[in-house]
Amino acid sequence: STQSTWGSGVATSYVNSRHEMVKIFKAGRVVIVLAGRRAGKKAVVVHNSDSGNKERPYGHCLVAGVQKAPLKITRAMPKAKIMKRIKVKPFIKVLNHQDVMPTRYNMDLGSEFKGKISLADPTKRAVSRRNVRKVFQQRYNAGKNKWFFQKLRF
């Protein structure tokens, strides 16, 4: 039987039957943002820090998500309108574990984001967002992870 361990409102890990800690916020875990401007948006964990650091002394994770999902298209639409509607608008953000809800879904990131995302200064952040947009757009165009690029209905 599994037993959850709760720390400050959100489970960050579980204890399985062999009494080993099982991490929830691993790279590739799909989460839903609960707080702030991007509340209700889907995101994927890129990097996780359970114990925190000097700058952020709490459990947090770097997420990349879909701020604006692609819209529906029809055959009658002109090519320019189709190109505009299928664009994916991403966001990257460091979030407290309390502000994200993990789902049961994982997204295979591979080495697509490894070392490519930096939030150190605005220019690096903009470059990182462009890299994320490129990866997400390729995945959307290829038809991978279709559920990730659909608007969350609740």
Image (cartoon, rainbow, N blue to C red):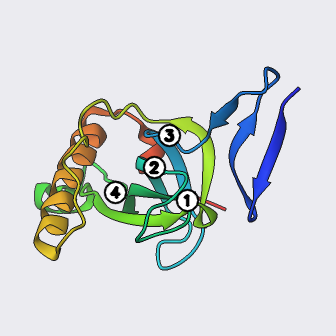
- Mark 4: secondary structure: loop
Horizontally, is 26 left or right of 90 in the view?
A: right
- Cα distance in 3D space between marks 3 and 4: 26 Å
Which residue in the protein does label 2 denote?
A: 48
- Cα distance in 3D space between marks 3 and 2: 6 Å
Q: 88 or 84, which lies in front?
A: 88
Which residue in the protein does label 4 denote?
A: 70
Residue 130 in sight in this render: yes
> Which is more foreground, mark 3 or mark 4?
3
Q: Position of residue 93 (x, y in %)?
A: 38, 66
- Cα distance in 3D space between marks 1 and 4: 31 Å
On residue 59, the disc is 1
Which residue in the protein does label 3 denote?
A: 26
Residue type beneath disc 3: Lys
- Mark 3: secondary structure: loop
Horizontally, is 103 left or right of 75 in the view?
A: right
Q: Are marks 3 and 4 in contact (CB under 8 Å)?
A: no
